[in-house]
Image (spheres, rainbow, N blue to C red):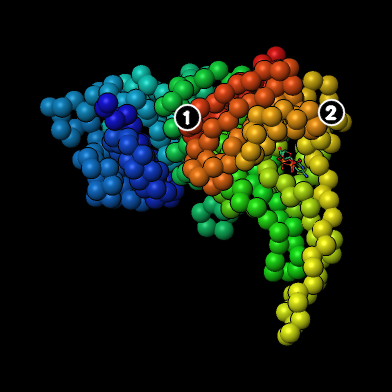
């Protein structure tokens, strides 16, 4: 099978260097990538870098290699065009159909999905001209990723940072797999918990678990792509924030409970993908616990943590709120899952078997989604995104 053809457009912003990482991810995951920088992008990263990383020649103008008509061919042959970073100027040109260099020509000839990852100063992003251009591009079916909030060039901070290249890559992967889909969760607020809680014993030690947070992040990312407002409660994940998602960091089960109850107050759906510690040390030592010569260690006394999923399920913050739990099991997977679904009182329970390649830390997963209505949806082994999409399909059905 031919490799999917991706055009990576790079416009002239300081974040151009981050597009090198996006390019590397795209090529390493089996995409044929043609880089089309603007002339100003080359002030930040030179043609030699793009050419070496992509394995293709690089040009910015329509006058290079004219016999191959690249200004038409590159766009026509693409399966996806992604512009990262997209400056305010580039968004304006794209919205107005200007074609004064190779990238803008490519955008006009492309008939495939187009993704823009904007990066600019907050004032430029918020300016009505930029906002109208973004609205125009979205109305025409382009995917415009929300910029991240954080440190900008110099001392400024605010909204306008290029999202992490990993996140742009995930958006590209999704669009290539599913095309630009209807935003069926538009107007919905969804809450997702991810990662694993840590229950501190002393200032340097904790009880924790192996959850990486990748499944929860996949859920957050896909819900945002489907138009939802997403609150992601992240417990000790160390993963970059998904584009366009509100992220709240928590550490312990008690903190997670507080954050879930607060966010769930106006949520249409709550998905508990986090691995929550069932117990925490009864006492927290404010100083480091030292070993004492010739003495056995003191036993660690544990107390129960609140069951957040059961609580949210029993006390729905609003009628029709859909609550989803996760269960990782090693034995009698489905029977244990059914019992847990009833015990927790949720609408859906995603049951997966803990195994060598599956679940913790891996990029893939397989699961059965059990419904309180008796339904069973099998999701075959595949990327965590695919499982996430199935969960949202089932949630969307229940919200409809
Ligand atoms: N969960 C929770 N609060 C807890 C423990 C778990 O909200 N204190 C949620 C998890 O986020 C997950 C689901 O409950 O969605 C199932 O977690 P699991 O650890 O499998 O459930 P337990 O009640 O711990 O079941 P058991 O220990 O019997 O397997």
Quadrant where the image shows the C terminus: top right
Dot 2 alpha-carbon crowd within 10 angstroms: few under 14, some 14 to 19, many 20 or more:
some
Q: CA distance from mark 2 to mark 1?
A: 32 Å
Residue placed furthest toward the top: 400
Q: Nearer the viewer, residue 42 or 301?
A: 301
Which label number is shown at residue 316?
A: 2
Residue placed furthest toward the left: 67
Q: Nearer the viewer, residue 120 or 342?
A: 342
Q: At 32% from the left edge and 29% from the top edge, which residue is drawn?
A: 4
Dot 1 alpha-carbon crowd within 10 angstroms: few under 14, some 14 to 19, many 20 or more:
some
Give percent across and percent down for residue 14: 43, 50
**In which image quadrant can residue 232 be found?**
top right
Which is nearer the N-term, disc 2 or disc 1?
Answer: 1
Give percent across and percent down for residue 340: 75, 33
Q: At 37% from the left edge and 29% from the top edge, which residue is drawn?
A: 81
Quadrant where the image shows the N terminus: top left
Q: Nearer the viewer, mark 2 or mark 1?
A: 2
Residue designated by label 1: 174
Which label number is shown at residue 140?
A: none
Q: In this rendering, is residue 316 above or below 28?
A: above
């Amino acid at each position: 099978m031919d490799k999917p053809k991706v055009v990576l457009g790079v416009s002239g912003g300081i974040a151009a260097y981050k597009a090198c990482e996006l390019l590397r991810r795209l090529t390493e995951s089996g995409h044929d990538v043609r880089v089309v920088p603007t002339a100003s992008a080359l002030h930040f990263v030179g043609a030699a870098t793009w050419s070496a990383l992509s394995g293709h020649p690089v040009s910015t103008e329509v006058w290079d290699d004219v016999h191959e008509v690249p200004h038409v061919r590159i766009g026509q042959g693409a399966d996806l065009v992604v512009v990262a970073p997209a400056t305010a100027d580039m968004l304006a040109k794209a919205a107005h159909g200007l074609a004064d260099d190779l990238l803008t020509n490519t955008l006009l000839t492309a008939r495939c999905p187009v993704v823009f990852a904007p990066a600019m100063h907050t004032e430029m992003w918020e300016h009505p001209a930029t906002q109208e251009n973004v609205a125009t591009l979205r109305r025409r079916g382009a995917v415009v990723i929300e910029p991240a909030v954080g440190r900008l060039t110099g001392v400024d901070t605010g909204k306008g940072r290029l999202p992490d290249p990993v996140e742009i890559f995930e958006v590209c992967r999704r669009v290539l797999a599913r095309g630009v889909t209807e935003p069926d969760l538009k107007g919905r607020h969804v809450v997702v918990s991810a990662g694993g809680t840590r229950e501190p014993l002393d200032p340097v030690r904790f009880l924790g678990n192996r959850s990486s947070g990748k499944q929860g992040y996949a859920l957050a990312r896909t819900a945002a792509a489907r138009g939802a407002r997403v609150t992601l409660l992240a417990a000790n994940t160390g993963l970059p924030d998904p584009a366009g998602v509100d992220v709240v960091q928590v550490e312990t089960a008690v903190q997670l409970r507080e954050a879930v109850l607060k966010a769930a107050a106006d949520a249409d759906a709550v998905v508990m993908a986090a691995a929550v510690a069932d117990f925490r040390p009864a006492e927290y030592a404010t100083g480091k616990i030292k070993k004492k010569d010739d003495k056995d260690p003191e036993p660690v006394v544990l107390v129960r943590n609140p069951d957040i999923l059961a609580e949210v399920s029993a006390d729905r913050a609003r009628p029709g709120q859909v609550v989803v739990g996760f269960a990782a099991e090693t034995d009698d997977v489905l029977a244990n899952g059914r019992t847990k679904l009833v015990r927790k009182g949720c609408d859906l329970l995603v049951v997966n078997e803990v195994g060598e390649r599956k679940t913790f830390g891996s990029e893939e997963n397989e699961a059965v989604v059990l419904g309180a209505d008796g339904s069973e949806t099998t999701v075959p082994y595949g990327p965590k995104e695919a499982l996430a999409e199935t969960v949202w399909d089932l949630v969307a059905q229940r919200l409809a």
